[in-house]
Image (cartoon, grey):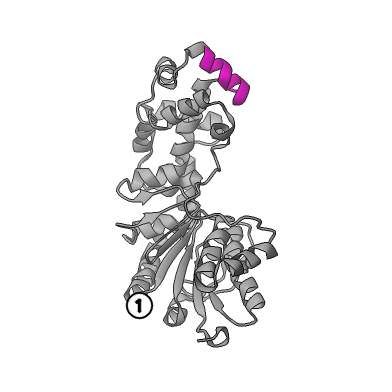
Amino acid sequence: MTRQNLQPWVFTFLLGDDFSMMSLAAAIEPLRSCNRLQETQAFRWHLASLNGETVTAASGIPFTTRPVNEVLAETDYLFLCGGERVVASRFERGYRAALRQAVHQGLAIGALSTGTFLLAKCGLLKGYRCTIHWESQAAFNESWPDIHCTGSLFEIDRNRLTCAGGTAAMDMMLYLIAERFGQNQAQAVASQFHHDRIRNREEHQRGGASLQMMAPPVVQQAITVMQAHLEEPLTMDAVAQRAGVGKRQLERLFARYAAKTPQRYYLELRLQQAREMLIYSNKSVIDIALSVGFSSTSHFAAWFRRLFGILPSAVRRGRRTKYQ
């Protein structure tokens, strides 16, 4: 079969409210560019929603869509484009129905960024590798400890495709282009976007880890120790001992490389995980507080407000208000 009469691969992007335009563009633009370079329609795509309503991106820009059930029959890949609202219970039944239909048709199913949450919630990632944006990984692991979430830029495990969002969506699509037309064609597409190096699916996300990347090994090890003990925080003496350095030396290194004490860094790690869980999980505030090492909600709330300027209950209440 020549390139001219290849059947196009059809992608449907199911948009959730507050979805990331960056992730969507990074997924679609390589397909468009490949069509142009191939001088054939190798790929087609639809923007869909549950009922064909206008969907507003996180940037506030509205997008016209088609009802997802009208386009699934001609779809090969269904991608859920995540946003905070994609985990809201009001919409869950509709997403479940669409995903159930896609599974019944044998489609490849994927997620961009936080769309991975809903795939897990619908039971579609059991026995599969997946990934999610680094900012949400701790909350995801807390909610689904039995699912192997790797932290890679993207994961393709049989007919499940997930990516960390942002430019990682481009690398995932370039992988699919290479699968169909070869690595040279994928590189030609990447060059159209000044994307000098196509990152593979073994590469891990670097976001949120800049200190670990730049700091000396002692600081990197101390952070790793902290991350492994969020629910039952260690003393700084214990952290320093496991990092192989004295407490005073650890404090000097954190002051130099993080501009804060190791105690403060540890506290912020715990609170950042709590914030993600408030947004993306249905756990109670007290359960979240306990999971990041606070024995009382009042102590947790006081520190949370000091760091983020808002109470934990307001984060949870604000999420619910948007979705009702």
Q: Is residue 88 visible?
A: no
Above or below, 180 against 187 in this view is: below
Above or below, 307 against 105 in this view is: above
In reply to whether residue 305 is colored magenta, the answer given is no
Dividing the picture into quarters, in which one does residue 252 lie? top right
In the picture, measured across the screen, residue 239 lies left or right of residue 215, that is left
Identify which residue is drawn at 41% across, 17% down: 241
The amino acid type found where label 1 is placed reads: Gln
Nearer to me, 5 or 16: 5
Q: Is residue 24 visible?
A: yes
Q: Please provide percent x and percent y for residue 179.
A: 49, 69
Q: Please provide percent x and percent y for residue 238.
A: 39, 17
Q: Which residue was labeled with disc 1?
A: 105
In reply to whether residue 254 is colored magenta, the answer given is yes
In the picture, measured across the screen, residue 187 lies left or right of residue 205, that is right
Above or below, 150 against 36 in this view is: above
Identify which residue is drawn at 41% across, 67% down: 109
Nearer to me, 183 or 235: 183
- The span shown in magenta is 249-260
